Image (tube, rainbow, N blue to C red):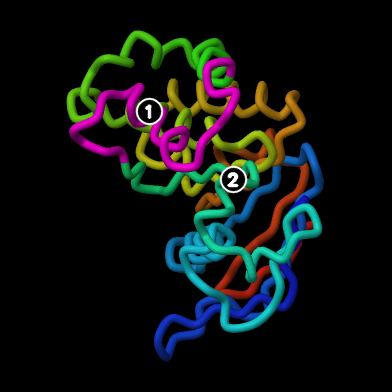
Amino acid sequence: MLKGSNVNVDIGPASIIRDGFFEIQTGQMVGLIGVNGAGKTTCMRTIMGLISPTSGHVTFDHLELTKTPAYQRAKLGIGYMPEDRRLVPLQTAEENIMTPVWSVGIPDWQDRLAWIYDLIPEIKVLKERPATSISGGQQKLVALARAIMLSNKLLLLDEPFEGIAPVLVNRISDILANMKTEGISILIAESNTQNCKNLLDKMFVIERGTISENS
């Protein structure tokens, strides 16, 4: 499904990812675990094409992503939830969820939106409310729903459990467990495994830009 090999990413003079390796099979939930500043977000942004690697290969369904324009990656069925949510303040919750539909075109968006509301019914009651009028935890769910709208193959989640109440941690864990049964591959970047260990099929540890598989 997704594989990175010998991935190097430099930002200015700083080497952020060094000979990075990672691999996710179809339907797997994989953790990328490391402290703040270890390179987790850089790795996610490199997969999405928001940062270009200095060298190395990232393949998705045997397609070389490093040669694929960033805007095309969303069309491949890859959804991404950034750490800071990045909701559009003047849009409603549902308009934020629908942004990928308007940006890249999703032919079955009505069925997919209905499925998302079944998966996360809490956000259906918020759909007409402006993004700025809902709580941080609710915004997290909306950002997750927006990423899911695209991710019929691969979902990338950057710190999905950070800064939220334990009850919401458990709720997001339930949502991800349900998604796993749909055969969607999921990569979760987290500072530790406290909130996601029981969900993971495999774990990679990133330390000072070096990625290793934790067996």
Q: Do the numbered discs 2 and 1 sit on residues whose CB atoms are within 8 Å? A: no
Name the residue at 57% across, 21% down.
112
Residue 8 vertical placement versus 176 (above, below): below
Q: Is residue 106 magenta?
A: yes
Give the mark nearer the N terminus: 2 vs 1.
2
The residue wearing badge 2 is: 75
In-image side of 64 versus 69 (left or right): right
How far separated are the C-alphas under marks 2 and 1? 33 Å
Q: Quadrant of residue 21?
A: bottom right
Can you tell which quarter of the image residue 90 is in? Answer: top left
Q: Which residues are magenta?
A: 87-111
Percent across and percent down for residue 163 are: 35, 39
Is residue 104 on the magenta stretch? yes
Q: SS for tag 1?
A: loop
Q: Quarter of the image containing the C terminus?
A: bottom right
On residue 165, the disc is 1
Q: Is residue 117 above or below residue 41?
A: above
- Dividing the picture into quarters, in which one does residue 200 lie? top right
Q: Residue furthest bottom?
A: 13
| Position of 67 relative to 96 (above/below) | below
Q: Secondary structure at mark 2?
A: helix
Q: Is residue 175 left or right of residue 19?
A: left
Q: Position of residue 195 (x, y in %)?
A: 55, 37
Q: Which callout, 2 or 1, points to the residue nearer the camera?
A: 2
